[in-house]
Image (spheres, helix red, strand yellow):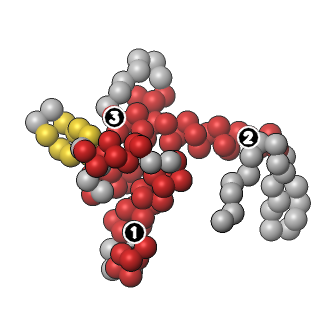
Amino acid sequence: VRRPFTTTECAYTSEAQPVAVKAVAQLEQYSKARWERVLHFLVGSEEDGSSLTAPPSEDIVKALLSANLLESCEEGLRITHQGFQFLLKDTYAQTWILLMRILRNTFPKTTERLVAID
């Protein structure tokens, strides 16, 4: 299993040119902030003046709903029991679950073969 780059390692492009560690660190920081935004949306937390209060993209919300991590109710959206279980998983498992759901929502006919992977 290949692990992601850390901020102290140097990544290489397909042409074997080193990528600035600073750029990798910025990308890592950006992706963590975006993921935190999804998790905060899932639990319904709202922090005034924070970028975490902005809802994630429509595709992410659809994925959360179709994965039964969120449900619609009279008050809006709320986390389900499966959503709480999702929060207990590690980030890689969470990402994989959400990615698979997005792929299924986007390409329903071609992802039927991926059912065994879940």
38 on left or right of 14: left
Disc 2 packing (10 Å; few <14; some 14–19; many ≥20): some
Which quarter of the rendering shows the C terminus? bottom left
Label 3 environment density (alpha carbons within 10 Å; few <14, some 14–19, many ≥20): some
Q: Are marks 1 and 3 in contact (CB under 8 Å)?
A: no
- Residue 68 as seen in the image, left or right of residue 1: left
Residue 57 screen position, x and y as percent:
40, 46
- Marks 2/3 in contact by CB < 8 Å: the verdict is no
Q: Residue at x 22, y 39 (%)?
A: 77
The x, y position of residue 5, in whole percent, is: 73, 52
Q: Which residue is mark 3?
A: 43
Judged from the image, the secondary structure of the residue bearing numbered disc 3 is helix
Question: Could you say whether the residue bearing mark 2 is in a helix, strand or loop?
Answer: helix
Give the CA separation, mark 1 to mark 2.
31 Å
* Label 1: element kind: loop
Residue 62 visible to an observer of this rendering:
no
From mark 2 to mark 3, how far is it between C-alphas? 27 Å
Q: Please, is residue 52 above or below residue 64 in the view?
A: above
Identify residue for label 1.
118
Q: Which quadrant holds the N terminus?
A: bottom right
Sequence-first tag of 1 and 3 = 3
- List x then y, in percent, for residue 67: 30, 57
Q: Please, what is the three-letter code of the amino acid marked with disc 3?
A: Val
